Amino acid sequence: MAPIAQQIAQMVNILPEADQALALELVKKLVLAWDPDYTKATPAEHAAMELAARELEAGEYVAENAINWD
């Protein structure tokens, strides 16, 4: 978790429960305003997708039929 997210969580945790619910609703509104259809990647998600793409291009993967799923 990012340091700022930890700070926010700690601060929200100090609030009374009713105000915690209000804070959660505010965060939801902020997230929806930033990404209304939840399609934007966070920096960490973007980095993971870039790494996965590089690994695929380099042939660094295991074929599905090579896995024993039982």
Image: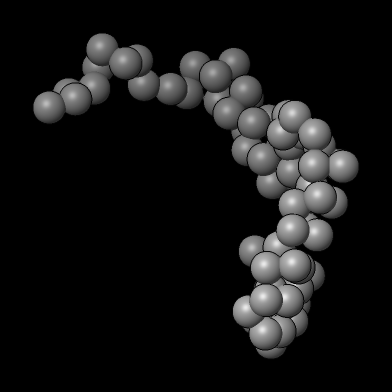
- 37 shown above or below 27: above
Viewed as shown, does residue 67 lie left or right of 52? left
In the depicted view, which residue is nearer to us: 59 or 1?
1
Q: Which residue is drawn at 67% across and 85% down?
A: 16
Position of the N terminus by quadrant: bottom right
Q: How is the image coloured?
A: one colour
Residue sticking out furthest to the left: 70
Tally of marks: 0
Residue 39 percent across, percent down from the top left: 73, 29
* Residue 34 figure quarter: top right
Q: Residue at x 32, y 16 (%)?
A: 64
Position of the C terminus by quadrant: top left
In the depicted view, which residue is nearer to us: 1 or 34?
34
* Residue 46 figure quarter: top right
Q: Residue at x 55, y 19 (%)?
A: 56
Residue sticking out furthest to the right: 33
